[in-house]
Image: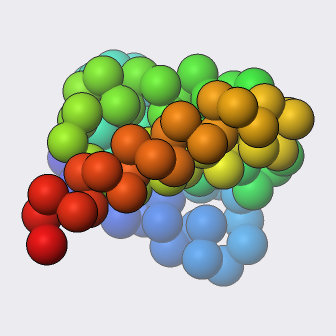
Amino acid sequence: MITNILHTARDYLNKGNHAEAESLCQQALNIEPNNSEALKLSGILAMSGENFTRAIKVFTQIVSLEPLNAVNYYNLGLACINIGESASAVQYFQKSIEINSKII
């Protein structure tokens, strides 16, 4: 069920209908609050809506759920840089690079 909801939400996002995508994403999170895919989509929606504080909160939660996913740290760094937290952003970018270098 959540997979279908998120698939539809991504379709709405790709079509530029952020409000509908956000609504479906929230619906998925109401069902499963720690669903990493729903959280990632929620973070992306927050970033695209320039709600960087919310994006940081969401990406921080994702990092705690998936600490070995470099993309999560990268996204967290992007959100930080957009609110002027350069030092934090650098730390998250470095963590992303560190994780990627262990994979390669």
Residue in the picture at 51% in, 49% down: 93
Is residue 63 visible in the rendered structure shown here? yes
Q: Is residue 6 above or below residue 90?
A: below
From the viewer's perspective, tell me whether residue 74 is left or right of residue 44: left
Residue in the picture at 78% in, 30% down: 85
Q: Is residue 73 above or below residue 67?
A: below
Q: Is residue 29 above or below residue 82?
A: above
Which residue is nearer to you in this view: 95 or 34? 95
From the viewer's perspective, tell me whether residue 102 is left or right of residue 75: left
State the image quarter where residue 35 is shown.
top left
Q: How is the image coloured?
A: rainbow
Which residue is nearer to you in this view: 91 or 33? 91
In x, y percent, where is residue 98?
30, 51
Q: How many marks?
A: 0
State the image quarter where residue 57 is shown.
top right
Residue furthest to the left:
103
Residue in the picture at 24% in, 33% down: 67
In x, y percent, where is residue 61?
41, 22
